[in-house]
Image (cartoon, helix red, strand yellow):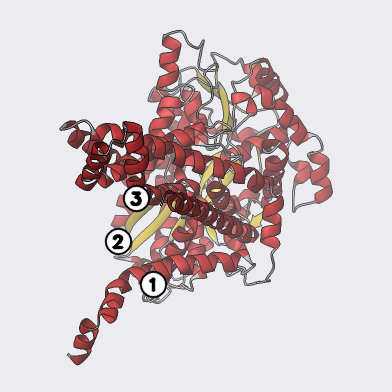
Amino acid sequence: MLILATSTALVLSACGASDDPGTKVDSQDWSGVLADAKGETVNWYMFGGDDALNTFVEDEVAPRLASRGVKLKQVRITDTAEAVNKVLGEVQAGRTSGGSVDAIWINGENFATGVQADIWACGWADDLPNDSYVDHTDPAVANDFGVPVKGCESVWQKANSALVYDSAKLDPADVASGDSLLAWVKANPGRFAYPAPPDFTGSLAVRSLLYSRIDGPSSLSGAFDEQAYTKATSTFFDDLNALEPSLWRKGETYPSSQDDVERLFADGEISAYFTYGPGAVATKVDDGVFPTSTREAVLSSGNISNFSFISIPKNAAHRSAAFVLADTLQAPEVQLAMFKATGAYPGIGVSRTSKTAQKEFARVPRSASVLSIDELSARAQPELSSEYLTRIEKDWKSQVLQK
Amino acid sequence: MTFVHAVTSSPVMRRAVLLAPAMLVIGVFFIGGLAQALAQSLGQQPLLGDSRWSFDAYRSAATDPAVRSSIGLTLRIGILSTLLATVLGVGCALVVRRLGSGRVWMTRLFQGTLAVPHLVGALCISLLLSPTGQVSRVAHAIGLVDGSQQFPALVQDGFGWGIIAEYVWKETPFMAVIALAAMTADLNRLEDVSRTLGAARWQRLRHVTLPMLDAPVGAAAILVLAFTMGSYEVPVLLGRPFPAPLSVVTYQSFSDTDLTSRPQAMAVAVLLATLTTIIAGLYLMLVQLSRRRRT
């Protein structure tokens, strides 16, 4: 079945290879880009599991694009790797232009995959007019999980991770550090869970626990170093394995996705979990899905943060329209609307926007359940390079999951 | 005109023309896909442009614990689901057939469940059998278990009960519909004749009814087996990340962010296709043997 499905995708994409390649307008010629984009439809592939974000895209992004003459077609996917695989399949079938994916919401490992296969359009992100709001001095903007960005993707959101917990079950002292959290987990078996890596958030949870053990990522900064890695993880995986009897379902199995983990929290099966979207927790509490006693915490070793981006495949059929989408998403008023509607943090540097915009950002009301941007960024830690990520996921699989 | 005439007048040509659309689909999608998977499993790297032909992907698959633990699970799920669905389906059909006017309604009920997608079925099973599901709640209410933690793991369990339950629930009506369709007026007549010749109820079932069913039911069982061994969405919703059936393992390595793991994904896919073919072949041989023994 799988063979059939993949080959069908390949053959179908090969059939469409005769699309008109069209002329590619240079991103430096912005008025040319705007003129070229008029009347085009941009096919934007993005993770579709966040209802609040989907509503924001429909209500805020689509009308703004329409006013610039671009029609938005949001393609919701469950895993960003699907969109990358679609482009890879098209490239494999020889479709070098007229590709069906115009833009992808992406970061980290999936971006690195595309770099490995050289499928991204590059050198355009700095030409977007709204790029002036982006803080390029932030190392996480210049390097995406250790992979140099080189204008191959444009910043959209900032993501700060956090620990979500039920304050009726855990005290602030329990979530002060990684050690106190693990002590609580051992004292309350079955009440903590993380999805099995390579799930995006599962991988984050494992790294957060690693950061807590080695007190931040400083010993693993830069490119992959076998010696540093061996030293940092010497008994780490054994300890995670030893933690299993205290995890949900005694660690005999792991939830297969973050959706599952959040459902377990909503059902009251577990009382704490890691998230990369702390802003979205407010909506869940307001909707009555999560208990009102839901709170967030940052461990003493800090919280992992990163930026997510918009990338454009080389073979995209509507490149100009994708440029306009990427630029629109960086506009301060759009970033503000996103922060208000979804709790997702601005990818642009707020201090670079106008005084009134800064006041607006500061005035956005905050639920008691979520932390403020200041609290979330005070101890923010960068991501490791994607080689470390892949290795950690591989070792977790063989030394924890399969043991 | 003459060409069209030549084509339509020759029975061989006519058959070839009529079969062409179907053969085209099978040829392009099935044979083409299989060939591509085989080529990539042997080291063709269309994306990295660095093809080195070898059996490395098969070698690394053979030592990968994810693959090794998966083979037994895949066979267990496929064979158990198919056996249970076949026995239950044929059993249902034998009972429904005696219902008289109720037969029409029961057949419609069976046909109705055929329209339910497996994805929906899997979600329903999850809502029913998960530790906080309906069955667990009822069991707690009547005092069978103390709480959701005590309820036995029936989804995401090591054996695969949740997955098997979904397949049996979905495929039993399918087998029943096939069996009912084979229970024609001819079969009634044959049974009447054997009764007048003095065959007892059990003898009629064994020597008349079941032999008439085994060709269509056997074919349907192979379909069910091939499906349950290769399906992805049900085990991904109701199973564990490890050990997982071969279909899930294939997708895990296919969607690996490292493109160099693609050959192994294709090797596992080829392994799965081979395994299914072998089991189906063995089953067909068994059916042939039993048929020969009877005649």
Using the image, determine if residue B154 lies above or below residue B39.
Answer: above
Please give the name of the residue rendered at 62% of the width and 72% of the height, measured from the top-left corner: B49
Q: Are marks 2 and 1 in contact (CB under 8 Å)?
A: no
Label 1 vs label 3: CA separation? Answer: 37 Å
Under circle 1, the secondary element is helix
Q: In the rendered view, would you say B63 is above or below B205?
A: below
SS of the residue at dot 2?
loop
The residue depicted at 31 percent of the width and 77 percent of the height is B16
Q: Secondary structure at mark 3?
A: helix
In screen coordinates, is A68 left or right of B123? left
- Of the 4 image quadrants, the one containing the C terminus of chain A is top right
Q: Chain of mark 1?
A: A
The numbered disc on residue A15 is 1
Badges 1 and 3: C-beta atoms under 8 Å apart?
A: no
Give the answer, above or below, for where B274 lies relative to B32: above
Q: Position of residue A375 (x, y in %)?
A: 59, 30
Answer yes or no: are tags 2 and 3 on the same subunit: no
- Rendered image: mark on residue A69: 2
Q: Mark 2 or mark 1: which is in front? A: 1
Name the N-terminal-most of marks 2 and 1. 1
- Dot 2 crowding, Cα within 10 Å, few <14, some 14–19, many 20+: some
Query: Which of the 4 image quadrants contains residue A357?
Result: top left
Q: Residues within 10 Å of mark 3 (few under 14, many from 20)?
A: some
Contact flag, marks 2 and 3 (Cβ < 8 Å):
no
The amino acid pointed to by label 3 is Pro
Location of residue B295 in the rendering, given as x and y in whole percent from the top left corner: 41, 52
Going by the image, does B48 lie left or right of A179? left
Whether residue B149 is visible, yes or no, is yes
Residue carrying label 3: B216
